[in-house]
Amino acid sequence: MFGILNINKPAGCTSRDVVNRVQRLVKPVKCGHAGTLDPLATGVLVVCLGGATRLIEYVQQMPKTYRGTFLLGQSSPSDDVETEITQQENAPRPTLAEIGAALPQFLGTIQQRPPAYSAIKQQGQRAYKLAREGKQVELAARPVTIHSLAIERYDYPELELTIHCGSGTYVRSLGRDLAKSLGTCAVMSQLARTAIGRFAVADGLSLEGLQLATIEQNLQPARLAVEQLPTLTLTAAQWEEISHGREIAACGLAEEEEMGDDIETDSAMAAKPQAANAAVNEQGELIALLKRTSLGKFRATRNFLKPS
């Protein structure tokens, strides 16, 4: 079993709970998820099966879309409603126009401080574990990318936003920082991930009643995890070569024109790390990831399927 599942995660369970449920149905096939959703959150959870677990990093790099609801004038240690909430006295009530005017400063690449209650490691331990023990947690700000922000609904204290963002963005932190810029505070009360790349919540499988037959019928091609990479179609002979760890010549590969500026001199290629290329067989199945060598050839960095 080699492919991708789009699961519509319900509230109240962890991402690991979802993976464990799938794992029990497909064992001994290995499973892993691409992008954690907190128990509070719902929506798209991409689960990779079999060799596709080696593609998780590529799914994680895909842009994500969220719909988040925030309660203004309130704060908590976790920046959401999962920990004790404190009401801000005499909290200002920003107008819809004021909120709209504040949004542009959070677009593009910004510096964002992750919440103390997060899975990021500090001193070798998960930050949320340290925070639950009452220890001081102060995580460093890091760059994240916000592609777009839109106000969907505002009925004080509730503010609902749609966020289209890059990997590593904490929506809780975004709500916290937006509120701070307006002279108030906020906690996240609801969160739904509506898309990861092409994987949309409308197409997600329900966890309730999930069965092996449902998984087999809805397993999507692993190739979708790397559709952003240049794709090369290999002949049976070329596939045989890379499956044994041997290099193949770059010239004559199908779709070679898609490589464009990746074809460079040996000295230029040695000066920078090489991006991967996806290799598919003549049936369009993902069979390997390839790396361009300094001799104008390709070799496999990861093999997924073997020639029959």
Image (tube, rainbow, N blue to C red):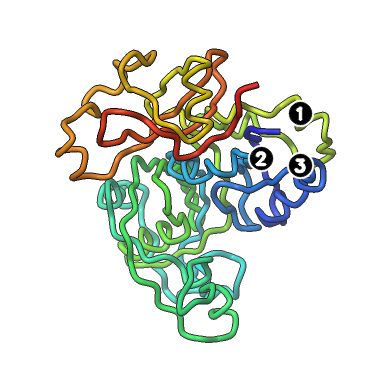
Q: How many C-alpha atoms fall within 10 Å of the one at disc 3: few (<14), some, or many (≥20)?
A: some
Q: At numbered mark 3, what does the secondary structure look like: helix, strand or loop?
A: loop
Please name the amino acid that badge 1 sits on.
Answer: Glu
Q: Tell me the residue that label 1 is attached to.
A: 216
**In the rendering, which numbered label is found on residue 50?**
2
Q: Tell me the residue that label 3 is attached to.
A: 207
Q: Are marks 1 and 2 in contact (CB under 8 Å)?
A: no
Please name the amino acid that badge 3 sits on.
Answer: Leu
Q: At numbered mark 2, what does the secondary structure look like: helix, strand or loop?
A: helix
In the rendering, at what x and y percent does residue 69 appear? 52, 51
Name the quadrant of the N terminus: top right
**In the rendering, which numbered label is found on residue 146?**
none
CA gap, disc 2 and disc 3? 19 Å
Of the image marks 1 and 3, the number of the one nearer the N terminus: 3
109 vs 159, nearest the viewer:
109
Q: Specify whether 220 is left or right of 300.
A: right
Q: What residue is rendered at 47% in x and 51% in y?
A: 159
Q: What residue is rendered at 47% in x and 20% in y?
A: 238
